[in-house]
Amino acid sequence: MPNLREWNRKLFLKINFTDILFVTIGAFITATGIVIFLAPNKIAAGGVSGIGIILHHIFNFPIGLTMLIINAFLFLIAFFVLGSEFGLKSIYATIILSFFVDLLEYLIPSSFYINDLVIASAFGNLLTGTGIALVLSRGSSTGGTDILAMIANKYTSINIGKALLAVDFLITLFAGIFFGKIIGMYSLLSVIINTNTIDYVLEGITKSFQAMIITSKHSEIKERILSELGRGVTLVRVIGGYSGDERLALWVILRSPREIVKMKEIVKEEDPTAFITITHIREVLGKGFKKISG
């Protein structure tokens, strides 16, 4: 059982306004996708929202409240069984998402709902995937069935990714049983769209670039990158495999294509014979980039 004092200390770590803003916007976008597109068509695209949609159409339970109750139960299990560390942002995201779902369901008239399975599957999951990605990008989560996946991982040899897919598949199976095989297949398709949307948006949010510049004008280029781009530069000692010449290379992390263009201009002006490699980086954490947070 995890230490309660340690739990409280990690739970109330300082979070900034930007994190809360992104989490709130992400939760709102996710709720919009659920209320306008997925729920009216009984599309249960896995996760706690999928369970909420199924129970809503069977027992007329409020989707948001159902999600909140299930997530609270899952967080409790995580605390006692897994000893997992869920920060304040994740708890906030869970609550605000449930609130937005029931609020929008109350405010938006049913005539505004999209009652087309193809359009609902496509746009509903583009919205929910984008919203969840925004939440995840700030080191938060909306709770959900990933906790069940972690439990399965702890007591079996199944990895978390496969366990999560199995849980989501089980939810879509129930959707097919209760609402028919067509709805079940659309729900399964929605899981695939949702997962890929999350990955795509997250990659776009967190992607950075690294450049390795091999040049004889390392001092001049270094100073201009520091002053004109405001980026740090790391000097790396390299030896040419063919010539055996030893020189210094510059290693730079850049945040956008615009910075890449400017860096190329600097290098071209200082040393047109320089050798440059530029590669994508999945994520950069630390000073000048995304804050390291859990």
Image: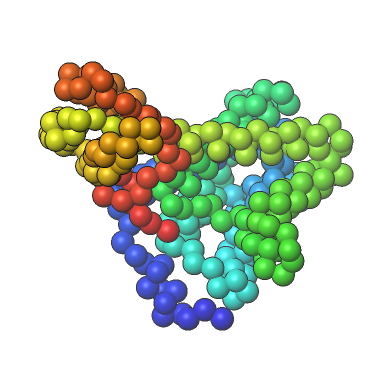
Whole-percent x and y of residue 1? 56, 81
Relative height, residue 186 to residue 65 (above, below): above
Of 278 and 3, nearer the camera is 278
Q: Quadrant of residue 239?
A: top left
Q: Is residue 72 visible?
A: yes
Relative height, residue 47 to residue 179 (above, below): below
Residue at point 68%, 29% (across, down): 121
* Side of 64 relative to 254 (left or right): right
Whole-percent x and y of residue 90? 47, 57
* Side of 65 relative to 8 (left or right): right
Whole-percent x and y of residue 212? 32, 34
Relative height, residue 164 to residue 192 (above, below): below
Residue at point 48%, 38% (across, down): 202
Q: Is residue 29 visible?
A: no
Of 89 and 42, nearer the camera is 89
Of 74 and 152, nearer the camera is 152
Residue at point 58%, 30% (across, down): 126
Q: How many marks?
A: 0
Relative height, residue 294 to residue 206 (above, below): below
Q: Quadrant of residue 271?
A: top left
Whole-percent x and y of residue 36? 60, 32
Image colouring: rainbow
* Side of 150 relative to 87 (left or right): right
Residue at point 53%, 52% (across, down): 142
Q: If the image is split into quadrants, where does the C terminus sit?
A: bottom left
* Side of 117 relative to 82 (left or right): right
